[in-house]
Image (cartoon, rainbow, N blue to C red):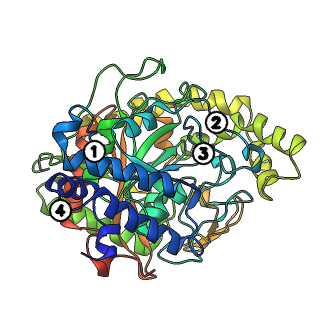
């Protein structure tokens, strides 16, 4: 088995080989580290790295697999899997800079409980992944970490804010990673890089204390397969005593869920609001045909009346960003990224009335539009990003030509609506490759807290359109 096969091996396959003793955790982490070092200069997906510690940890995992009777009760579900965690997520005793030089000396005193669970179950933390400053762009560059680029094409962004995690997976430089998502920051990079990302419903995965009461924000798994994403979700999810909002019920996702024969799935290409690149639309419709061939009933859902809610799904969060963005400019202007004043300028366009309007409008939208959709359909599908052609060093107000319109990346990312309706689980999966050779993706949106269905649909699509499993379907590095 060559290094490329190891680097793109799924987590579920790696665990099976560890248990069969046909692969060692040391072999896998060594291949991952070698790939990480090889791509760092050009793609730059990693922040802080812990390679030596990871190699030592892999040797311990190797002993556990070699002598399981001697380590009874000490073998985690993810034992020995190479894990990279987004730079914004706290891990006790480690630095999480949130992409900002303001935090370059900050060492966390506690761990995010979802990450803590991954580590307790044996995942081998070898690196942190890059994000833009304050996780506030749909691209991935900052003064702190430089420019992170898309493995499929270096002039294109891997997306944001979990861009480093997505880029590492697409480049075969990580087996599993994590991201966070308040407006699409897991799903948009997953789409840009051709990997899988999951925004769980609010409360499914416990959060850090500073954002656990923010219903927009979720932490979630990112991987190259739906099964790997489910594996991570099963470990991360569940009630935690230090997160008041975490759910008491558990949702265990099977590695091989039921098929989708007879399932009713609604879809919209544009949510009645977005302009879509023709290649993205073609790949999306091709994926829908695959689901139809698998036995699902697929119906187009004509939509209108969502535009104000989509804008306010961004605007409510922009309003709440006034304070920390103003503080960064007033007190740290010498170290912040050049685009931070632009972020504040955008945020100041929204006020308390917009925040209140977003709340009052939500009930109407759910009662009149989204609620009826989920009464009729088991799941709802739409594209993730209207075009992948976003430059790597794009700023928030820069525009991209889509059709005949110049649009910002906020106006082409089709995700924030489902952060506002945060109880809906959303699984982002690849939907194909454009003529320009860039990945595109779709979102599978479920009824509130119906995680199982979105994974059933994702598994069916992956079976029909496998993604990074063969060399010819991977980026040329």
**Is residue 315 among what the camera can see?**
yes
Sequence-wise, the earlier of marks 1 and 4 is 4
Q: Which of 79 and 134 is in front in this view?
A: 79
Q: How far apart are marks 1 and 2 (CA)?
A: 33 Å
Sequence-wise, the earlier of marks 3 and 2 is 3
Sequence-wise, the earlier of marks 3 and 1 is 1
Q: How far apart are marks 1 and 4 (CA)?
A: 21 Å
Q: How far apart are marks 4 and 3 (CA)?
A: 52 Å
The structure residue drawn at horizontal position 80% and vertical position 49%, both measured from the top left corner, is: 345
Q: Where is residue 317 in the image (x, y as percent from the top left)?
A: 64, 38
Instruction: Give me the disc on residue 215.
Output: none
Q: Position of residue 402 (x, y in %)?
A: 56, 71
Q: Where is residue 275 in the image (x, y as percent from the top left)?
A: 51, 64
Which label lies toward us, 1 or 2? 1
The structure residue drawn at horizontal position 32% and vertical position 35%, both measured from the top left corner, is: 372
Residue at label 3? 311
Q: Is residue 207 left or right of residue 28?
A: right
Q: Nearer the viewer, residue 430 or 40?
A: 40
Tell me if mark 4 has few (under 14), some (14-19) or many (20+) residues whose alpha carbon lies within 10 angstroms of its own: few
Residue at label 1? 231
- Tell me the quarter of the picture where residue 399 sits: bottom right
Q: Is residue 175 left or right of residue 96?
A: left
Which label lies toward us, 2 or 4? 4
Q: How far apart are marks 3 and 1 (CA)?
A: 34 Å
Residue at label 2? 316
């Amino acid at each position: 088995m060559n290094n490329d096969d190891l680097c793109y091996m799924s987590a579920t396959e790696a665990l099976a080989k560890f248990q069969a003793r046909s692969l060692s955790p040391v072999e896998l982490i060594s291949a991952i580290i070698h790939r990480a070092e090889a791509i760092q200069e050009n793609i730059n997906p990693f922040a802080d790295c812990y390679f030596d510690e990871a190699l030592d940890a892999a040797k311990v995992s190797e002993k556990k697999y070699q002598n399981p009777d001697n380590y009874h009760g000490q073998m985690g579900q993810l034992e020995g899997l190479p894990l990279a965690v987004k730079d914004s997520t706290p891990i006790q005793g480690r630095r999480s800079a949130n992409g900002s030089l303001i935090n370059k000396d900050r060492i966390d005193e506690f761990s995010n409980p979802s990450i803590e669970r991954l580590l307790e179950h044996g995942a081998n933390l070898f690196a942190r992944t890059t994000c833009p400053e304050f996780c506030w762009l749909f691209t991935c560059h900052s003064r702190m970490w430089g420019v992170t680029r898309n493995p499929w094409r270096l002039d294109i962004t891997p997306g944001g804010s979990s861009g480093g995690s997505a880029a590492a997976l697409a480049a075969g430089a990580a087996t599993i990673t994590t991201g966070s998502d308040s407006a699409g920051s897991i799903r948009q990079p997953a789409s840009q890089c051709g990997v899988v990302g999951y925004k769980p419903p609010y409360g499914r995965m416990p959060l850090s204390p500073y954002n656990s009461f923010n219903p927009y924000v979720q932490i979630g798994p990112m991987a190259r397969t739906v099964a790997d994403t489910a594996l991570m979700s099963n470990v991360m999810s569940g009630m935690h005593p230090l997160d008041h909002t975490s759910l008491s019920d558990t949702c265990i996702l099977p590695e091989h869920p039921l098929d989708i024969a007879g399932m009713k799935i609604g879809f919209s290409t544009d949510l009645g609001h977005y302009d879509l690149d023709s290649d993205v639309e073609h790949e999306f419709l091709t994926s829908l045909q695959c689901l139809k061939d698998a036995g699902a009933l697929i119906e187009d859902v004509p939509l209108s009346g969502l535009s104000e809610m989509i804008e306010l799904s961004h605007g409510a969060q922009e309003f709440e960003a006034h304070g920390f963005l103003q503080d960064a400019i007033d007190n740290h202007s010498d170290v912040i990224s050049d685009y931070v004043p632009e972020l504040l300028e955008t945020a100041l366009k929204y006020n308390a009335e917009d925040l209140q309007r977003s709340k009052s409008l939500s009930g109407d939208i759910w009662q009149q539009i989204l609620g009826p959709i989920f009464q009729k359909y088991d799941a709802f599908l739409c594209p993730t990003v209207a075009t992948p052609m976003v430059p790597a060093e794009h700023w928030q107000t820069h525009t991209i030509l889509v059709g005949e319109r110049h649009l910002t990346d906020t106006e082409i990312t089709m995700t924030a609506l489902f952060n506002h309706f945060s109880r809906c689980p959303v699984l982002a999966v690849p939907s194909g490759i454009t003529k320009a050779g860039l990945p595109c993706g779709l979102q599978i949106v479920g009824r509130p807290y119906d995680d199982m269905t979105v994974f059933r649909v994702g598994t069916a699509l992956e079976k029909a359109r496998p993604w990074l499993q063969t060399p010819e379907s991977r980026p040329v590095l």
